[in-house]
Image (cartoon, rainbow, N blue to C red):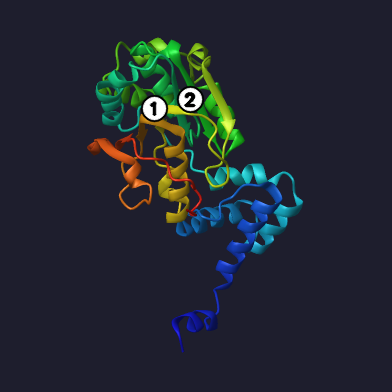
Amino acid sequence: MSPEATALATPQPVEDIELDLLLDAIWRRHQFDFRNYSRDSLKRRMDRARVHFGCSTLSQLQERVLHDPAVPGTLMGFLTIQVSEMFRDPAYFRALREHVVPHLRTWPSLKVWIAGCANGEEFWSLAILFREEGLEERTIFYCTDINPAALEKAKAGIYDLERIPDFTRNHRASGGKGSLSDYYTAGFGAARFDPSLRRRAVFADHNLASDAVFSEVQLVSSRNVLIYFDRQLQDRALGLFARSLTRGGFLGLGAKETLRFSRHSDLFGDFVADEKIYRRNATAIKEAVDGTD
């Protein structure tokens, strides 16, 4: 019997069938596409969601997704990762400050895409960095995420006061100028970052699994997003980033992410390799970003 026939003859576990059907229901009913996310991660998150909604099976959760309008918004909190901190991995932001910013200064106007901005820590970090480096007035920030609730939190720029000491240490280690306290006001157990930092920011829904390129930018910062995608979706996202970047533009990824095995790797060169910062080269962009040539 051929390997293909053997695979067809082997029954698929019920839990895998339920997960496939649930993901398809989410996509067809609500247009959120998680079908190419990492399966192991999805299984863990869906199991937590199942318990939260009091469902004994994923099939029961699917029924809720299809018929209860209150479920999808809450479910998004389980399916999207919102854990971050300001100036996370300070060496990355120091590398931006010391190596990328001098090149960004050569453009008369700048656009920065923060893809998968979650609750906004990455945006506020970059907004502060660009203000400190004198680039704020010529920059537009595009902050995108699949989760509308996260986008609202990102726009608000309000974080628990107990997180501020870590943010402050990261800012200092990233080469920050002055004190982080210059950029927020504290009260009632929370810190609210200066709303003027977001006056040149656009917050918008964007799904790397299904949406298209929307602007030409000089910097894409998408850190710790690709690690939750399977190889096919990683390639699609990297294709979007490549098509968005002007030639000579920069791409920043997370510490555990790489271009090495992507079919788009020839479009980039290492710039600050240790910090996963790449530069878009002059190679012609491939026509497709969805796995077809």
Q: Is residue 272 above or below residue 260?
A: above
Name the residue at the right extreme: 67
State the residue in front, 145 or 241.
Answer: 241
Residue 220: image location, x then y, percent: 41, 32
Q: Residue at x 58, y 30 (%)?
A: 204
Using the image, determine if residue 34 lies above or below residue 18: above
Measured as percent of width and height from the top left, residue 194 is found at: 48, 13
Q: Residue furthest front?
A: 284
* Image x and y of residue 62, in percent: 68, 58
In the rendered image, is residue 17 in sight?
Answer: yes
Q: Mark 1 points at which residue?
A: 86
Q: Residue at x 55, y 32 (%)?
A: 214
Q: What element carries label 1?
A: loop
Label placed on residue 50: none
Q: Residue 60 vs residue 217: left or right? A: right
Q: Alpha carbon of mark 2 to alpha carbon of mark 1: how far?
A: 10 Å
Residue name at image x 52 percent, y 81 percent = 10
Seen in the image, is 185 located left or right of residue 107?
right
